[in-house]
Amino acid sequence: MSWRDNIIKIEPYVAGEQPNKTDFIKLNANENPYPPSPRVKEAVARFDTEHLKKYPSANAVPLVKAIAKREGLKPENVFAGNGTDDVLSLAFRAFFNSEKPIIFPDITYSFNTVWCDILKIPYETVPVDENFNISAEDYARENGGVVIANPNAPTSIGRDLTFIREILDCNRDSVVIIDEAYVDFGGTTAVPLLKEYDNLLITRTFSKSRSLAGMRLGWAMGSAELVAALYATKDSMNSYPVDSIAQSAGVASIEDEDYFQCTLKRVIATRERLTKELRAMGFSLPDSQTNFVFAAHPKYYAKEIFEYLKTKDIYVRWFNKPRIDNYLRITIGSDEETDALIAALKEFVKP
Ligand SMILES: *Cc1c(COP(=O)(O)O)cnc(C)c1O
């Protein structure tokens, strides 16, 4: 035996490339092209660094209160953390302690399998159909938990409340996590179902729709019982997770609803324009309810287009994974970035 045998063997999540240069168009991590609310800028500028000598509010109380108010919930139904990834990993730890496998779609957020591996949670994936649709009946089976991203990533497809209700109705004995990272871009939230299902946990992020990927802020909403289990888990790992500056920035963001709505409208308008342009060039893609599109071209390999775009300093996401390796996931950038993308693609894709 060597200490080497005891070192973790794990395949980590791989994020979108961050090339070591400044002048390129980054459409590979679903970041928002617009800055966060000016109120966030103000809150950070005004932040009195004197406060940093003290620990932050342990349970991010001001932030939790602001989120609860916006969502029409009680603070006891909200949990805030350092990005959704932090919140989800705590949720996996807190809720998936059964011998039975947890289930999620084969094509979905690729962090799920990583957390299962590191936390030793058994899992099974459920294939989506050939159009990437998730069928609720497939989730009517014994399991140790259910995780669905709605809208789903990287497919960009969102489903309605009836679908979520079907999933919940056949899973009364499991915690069902609905990851709503992209819901603000036109999806349907499951928040109205929280009153009826105390096994439902919904997660959200500030990284995409609120332009705060660099700040690391996310939250979960669920019954007081689920939220209490998240706090207990957090307090068993690291009891002060959201730093004071991030808490102030988060509150400022949540309180600026007008700016938030305005930014969403811009991203959605660009998405609709890009969708039309891509279809005119022969790409096929589902209608997106997110801030990205998931597109394939019948005549060109996705990897070829991905490599070509890099030569034009445009970075999109290509997953070398079964079933989706001929698709590109393209983040909705600013109008200028999107124009550059369209121009580059038009040059490549000859009619
Ligand atoms: C981006 C993303 C997250 C995580 O976001 P954070 O930056 O950790 O808040 C979670 N789920 C999905 C599906 C995402 O795309």
Image (tube, rainbow, N blue to C red):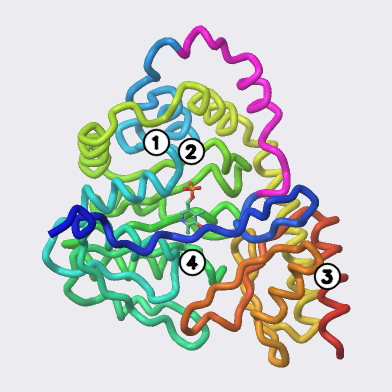
Q: Which residues are magenta?
A: 32-52
| Nearest to N terminus: mark 2 or mark 3 | 2
Which is the main secondary structure of the residues drawn in magenta?
Answer: helix
Label 3 to label 1, Cα distance in Å? 38 Å
Label 1 to label 2, Cα distance in Å? 7 Å
| Nearest to N terminus: mark 1 or mark 2 | 1
Instruction: Please rate how many residues cluster around mark 3, counting C-alpha atoms within 10 Å: few if below 14, some from 14 to 19, many from 20.
Output: some
| Nearest to N terminus: mark 3 or mark 4 | 4
| The furthest residue to the front | 2
The CB of the residue at mark 2 lies under 8 Å from ligand 1: yes
Label 4: which secondary element: loop
On the image, the x and y values in percent for residue 287 come to 63, 73
Circles 2 and 3 in contact, beta carbons < 8 Å = no
Q: Residue at the spot x=71%, y=74% of the render?
A: 307
Label 1 to label 4, Cα distance in Å? 22 Å
Instruction: Please rate how many residues cluster around mark 2, counting C-alpha atoms within 10 Å: few if below 14, some from 14 to 19, many from 20.
Output: many
Choose between 300 and 258: the one closer to the eye. Answer: 300
Residue bearing the label numbered 3: 342
Circles 1 and 2 in contact, beta carbons < 8 Å = yes
The image shows residue 292, relative to residue 281, as above or below, that is: above
Residue bearing the label numbered 4: 152
Residue bearing the label numbered 1: 80
